[in-house]
Image: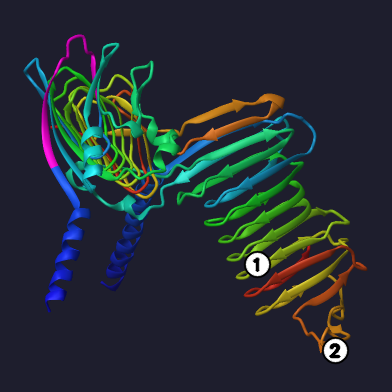
Amino acid sequence: MNRILITIFLLCSLGSSFAQSRIKDSIQLALDLNQVSRVHLSNINGSITVKGTQRDQAELRGVRTLSAMGEESMKDAQADVQVTTLKKDGHLFIYLNIPRFGFEVDGEGKGSYAGCYDSPKGMRKPLGYSFTYDFVLYIPHNTSLEISTINDGDLSVEDVYAAVQAKNINGSIELHNIGRVSEAHTINGDIHITQREIPTQDAFFSTINGDVKLWYPENLSAEVLLMSRRGELLTAYDWKALSPETEKITEEKGKSTYKIHSWNRIQIGNGGPKIHMETLNGDLYVLKDK
Amino acid sequence: MFNLTNHHIMKYIIWNFVSIAIGFSLILPISSFAQNRTEEIVVPLSEVGSRGKLEVHIHRGRVTIEGSNRTEDVLVEVSSEDKDRQAQRTYPNGLKRIPNNVTNIRIEEDGNEIEIHGDHSNKVSDLFIELPSNFDLEIHTHHNGDILVSNVSGVMELNSHHGPITAKDISGAVVANTHHGAIKASFKDVNSDVPMAFSTYHGNVELKLPSNTAFSGKLQSSRGEILTDFEMTVKPDPDRVKKRNENGHFEVNLGGWVYGDVNQGGPEFMMKTYHGDIIIQKN
């Protein structure tokens, strides 16, 4: 009997030394927006919530959750998963400086995790830990913004009166009371956007599995191009149909190609910038913000 | 008294007819107008005057081809009709439905060969094509796939699955294949040395040929009749008796084919249907 108890005790203690440990902590960071025209927040796993405020200061709050097998891995995780900021040419980039993900900034003011795509060597060894970072960002109303995440989180922005761009993969996008939105893309999730101003520039919204719902001021005037493979196209505005876009390409050796594109084109008001809306499994809505 | 009642009944019936007719004339144009969209593309030919070839590959939609006195170009009209049942629905909060019915169409021209490709979406695109009459055709459609060809002279391959195939006032040679629908072809002139084939499953195969056409028919209608006003010399099935197969067994094959020569015979015209008649007539 004693032997059995001892064996069970030993097995349990052995198990606990390899058990998954989990750490949850948080940060609070004041951001210097001096000479910054655009804030970029690039997340990997986790959500981003942004609130436009009347204050001049910007502040980032983050909740970090790490889980790892063994102490070594947890130490790696704590060292790797750090929020980093970089100011460059009027842009403030906020990202996670995990070596394997290799965050890079190009010359055109765009930042991305290049390592995700072109470093198969680094991907061979398993990371040894998993992480999520949930961010809440407070910025002055008129700060232009670009946010992105990949897994385990939604993107939501409220009361930002400047230009906003949002990219997600596995999660939804909610942008409300926004100045103007030029792009919002996800793959698995809905896109809901309320804009304060009527658009003056072309815009592009796409998802694959989800609806796209756009709310605009009542006096919207735009050309809307819609494509849904399996859903419906609905609007609260009066609209008139425009004929599909056709394109002519003349190649060398005298071969000519004509294309009729499968966008359903409509005009709202007197027409204007092109608003593209695309989904595969979902409905598309152009609605009035009241 | 009796006459008066009769008169009233007549008046009632007439008014009912009138009001129904007015009702229809009001409803029909509105519903058909709102849902149709047509796109026109004129494709110039690079070798004006010489024979052209048209290839069409679409998945859902009717193909109508008309030979005309056009010489320099081909007119392609793509129309999409909103056949969705949701079109009749009313939506809450004043929402209006936008028809979701445009497909990708790609048209290429290279040395008088025109290729039209549609995508495999669930939307229907009907094609109307007007071209010079000296054109060869290769047409493929599948769903809602009626094919109608008229006044074209050339070698034609016409393929559908859900839809009848009709060729009127054509000359040349035809291979036509569908499953749900009749095949009807009336020839002004026939290529004297090219075999032809017409096959469907549900529907008649009806040919109208010039009376001097010489051909050897190979005909099969599993559940229908074979009718002709040509003098046809029915021949025995050449494949009927096989001497011995590989197992050494003696084999007699009574296939359902009827073989017959018209005007001393010529190239083989194969006609086959399961539920339908085969009708071969003189022009």
Horizontally, is A48 left or right of B282 in the view?
Answer: left
Please report the bounds of the magenta region as a residue range.
A24-40
Q: Are marks 2 and 1 in contact (CB under 8 Å)?
A: no
A178 or B21: nearer the eye? Answer: A178
User: Quarter of the image containing the N terminus of chain A?
Assistant: bottom left
User: Quarter of the image containing the C terminus of chain A?
Assistant: top left
Classified by dominant secondary structure, the portion drawn in magenta counts as strand
The mark nearer the N terminus, 2 or 1, is 1
Question: Which dot marks residue B248?
Answer: 2
Question: Which dot marks residue B200?
Answer: 1
Residue A283 in sight in this render: yes
Q: Quadrant of residue B237?
A: bottom right
Q: Quadrant of residue A194?
A: top left
Residue farthest along the left direction in this orientation: A55
Question: Which dot marks residue A10?
Answer: none
B61 or A286: nearer the eye? Answer: A286
Instruction: Give the answer, above or below, for where B108 lies relative to B223.
Output: above
Give the chain of mark 2.
Answer: B
Residue farthest along the right direction in this orientation: B264
Q: Residues within 10 Å of mark 2 (few under 14, many from 20)?
A: few
Instruction: Give the answer, above or below, for where A155 lies relative to B137.
Output: above
A262 or B194: nearer the eye? Answer: A262
Q: Residues within 10 Å of mark 1 (few under 14, many from 20)?
A: many
- Residue A121 belongs to the span the image colors magenta: no
Give coordinates of residue B174: x percent, y percent. 75, 56
Residue A264 in sight in this render: no
The nearer-to-camera label among 2 and 1 is 2
Horizontally, is B212 left or right of B108 in the view?
Answer: right
> Residue at image x 74%, y 80%?
B256
- Residue A38 belongs to the span the image colors magenta: yes
Give coordinates of residue A276: x percent, y percent. 36, 32
